[in-house]
Amino acid sequence: MSKSGAIDNEREIIDVINEEDLVIDSKPKREVHLKNLLHREVAILVLDENGNLLLQQRSYKKKYFPGEWTVTAVGHVHSGQKPEDAAHEELQEELGFDIPLRFVEKRKYESDNHTSYGYLYLGTFHRGTKIIPDKNEIQKAEFKSKEQVERMIESKEIGTHSIKTISNLFNGLYQ
């Protein structure tokens, strides 16, 4: 991320990994995406004390999935960075807060032009914590009940890449 808050895909270096999740190279994020190289990403789910899920609507300025609702925070793991450190960094950069996180799974994500190992973390939001969305990253962030999230999935407001993760959460797989 640049100092202005805008992501610089030429300067942001991420690790290219093999199927065993071992680093085999490091390249600019833009090149990794153009060549569909396997890399690491993080996703974070944050719940409040009532079990409501904090979702973010991606900024309309984003190149990929503008305006789409997704999990609390997502991002790439920078070269040499630990996934847990990347998760905390994404929370701070995108939402302006940090909380204790618990690792819940690593899963391979594959789509037409994107392949990554995603590290998923779960945390509990503490009342009184301020959410300060980075407007370059996020249009808005809101807590949603399970019923609201289910309606958003039905109406296709939530991106397909987030549905399995959110469904697993509400089906009790991340206890």
Image (spheres, rainbow, N blue to C red):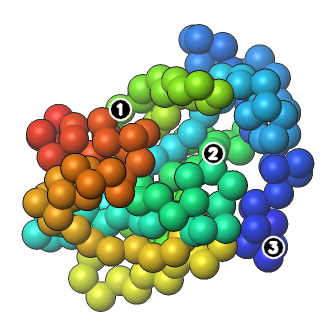
User: Residue 143, how many percent across, how many down?
Assistant: 26, 72
Answer with left or right where residue 127 lies relative to residue 63: left
Answer with left or right where residue 142 lies relative to residue 37: left
Q: CA distance from mark 2 to mark 1?
A: 16 Å
Quadrant containing the N terminus in the rendered view: bottom right
Q: What amino acid type should be assigned to the residue bearing mark 1?
A: Glu
The residue carrying mark 1 is 105
User: Residue 130, how many percent across, how many down?
Assistant: 40, 86
- Whether the residues at callouts 2 and 1 have beta carbons within 8 Å, the answer is no
The residue carrying mark 3 is 3
Provide the secondary structure element on which disc 2 rests: strand
Q: Nearer the viewer, residue 166 or 84?
A: 166
Looking at the image, which residue is at 35% across and 64% down? 55
Answer with left or right where residue 148 lies relative to residue 115: left
User: Residue 161, how many percent across, how many down?
Assistant: 43, 39
Image position of 70 with respect to 41: above or below: below
Image position of 3 with respect to 44: above or below: below
Q: Nearer the viewer, residue 138 or 24?
A: 138
Give the label on residue 76, or none.
2
**Label 3 crowd (10 A; few <14 / some 14-19 / many >=20):** few
| Image depth: mark 2 or mark 1 in front | 2
Q: CA distance from mark 3 to mark 1?
A: 31 Å
Q: Quadrant of residue 174?
A: top left
Q: What amino acid type should be assigned to the residue bearing mark 2?
A: His
Looking at the image, which residue is at 77% across and 17% down? 24
